[in-house]
Amino acid sequence: MARAKANLARAQQRQEISRAALADILGMADTRIEIREGPLVGQPPDGVPTAPISDHPVAKTQRLRVDEFLYRAKVFDRTYYPRFDFESALYGRGTGANTDGSFPGGASGLEFQRSNWAIGLTVTFSAFDIFSIRAKKNIELADERAEVARHDQTIQDLTGQLRKAQASLEGARRVAEATPVELKAARDTETQERARYQAGLATIVEVSEAQSLLVQAEIDDVLARLAVWQNLAGVAASQGDLDPFIQLVVQKTQGGP
């Protein structure tokens, strides 16, 4: 009895510590949090919709990095092209003076008496920059190849994380399928021991041990179901999109199948 009281005190201690930690996470440190059993301890869903690893935000970011260096290299392909500038000019002159040196006066000279025009084409070509441009382009191409390697490594890492999350989900699901059998066996044992105790064929210690096993089986069953939900969140996170998981949670809490 003394050991049972000590275990109860330890369990209550862990409960209060967990309650305080949850309140801190929720930003309600001065509020006492009450936990109620919700629909998530029921039968978990089959899974979350899968998406290609290439749609992961990290993979998209790395892909954009590859494109950035690729386009920077293409800029140097056009840097060596000649530059064509079209130029034109118009000229007009009006003095109001005649060839004999006389001035008619009045508005004479305001209009153009002599005019001319010109048009030309200027070609600019950096003949001596070809070597530096080629070196800069090679640098950009080398950076682009490095980013491609990082992109491939990123895809490998993300794929590995997804496979681990899926394997963890599959294991959690198998555990959740096995715990109901354990729970049923514990209930049957507790019922039998209680009947034997009432008939005088068993001691109170045997009944308490059966009830302890039943409580542990109930805990294992609930934790196994919650572990499936936790691993569903892990799979969604490894795909870089939590929206499908959140939709499953909302659907379950609102009474969906």
Image (spheres, rainbow, N blue to C red):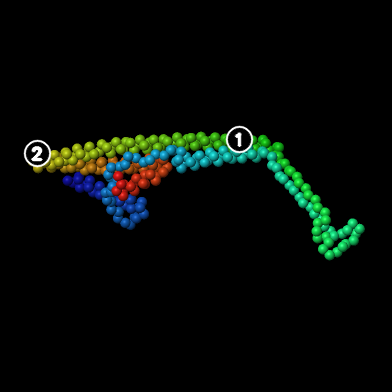
Question: Quadrant of the rendered structure where residue 101 is?
Answer: bottom right
Question: Closer to the observer: label 2 or label 1?
Answer: 1
Residue appearing at x 22%, y 40% in the figure: 183
Q: Residue furthest right?
A: 100
Instruction: Categorize mark 1 by other alpha carbons within 10 Å: few (<14), some (14-19), many (20+).
Output: some
Question: Quadrant of the rendered structure where residue 241 is?
Answer: top left
Q: Position of residue 42 (x, y in %)?
A: 27, 44
Q: Quadrant of the C terminus?
A: top left
Q: Which residue is mark 2?
A: 201
Q: Position of residue 91 (x, y in %)?
A: 79, 52
Vertical arrangement, residue 157 with respect to residue 10, above or below: above
**Looking at the image, can residue 203 be seen?**
no
* Mark closest to the chain's N terminus, 2 or 1: 1
Residue appearing at x 59%, y 40% in the figure: 72
Left or right of 134 on screen, residue 45: left
Disc 1 residue type (three-letter)? Asn
Residue appearing at x 30%, y 55% in the figure: 32
Residue appearing at x 64%, y 39% in the figure: 78
Helix, strand, or loop for circle 2? loop
Helix, strand, or loop for circle 1? helix
Disc 2 residue type (three-letter)? Leu
Vertical arrangement, residue 21 with respect to residue 166, above or below: below
Q: Residue furthest bottom?
A: 106
Q: Nearer the viewer, residue 160 or 74?
A: 74
Left or right of 95 on screen, residue 123: left
Spatial separation of the CA atoms under disc 2 and disc 1: 89 Å
Q: Position of residue 167 (x, y in %)?
A: 35, 35
Instruction: Categorize mark 2 by other alpha carbons within 10 Å: few (<14), some (14-19), many (20+).
Output: few
Q: Which residue is mark 1?
A: 138
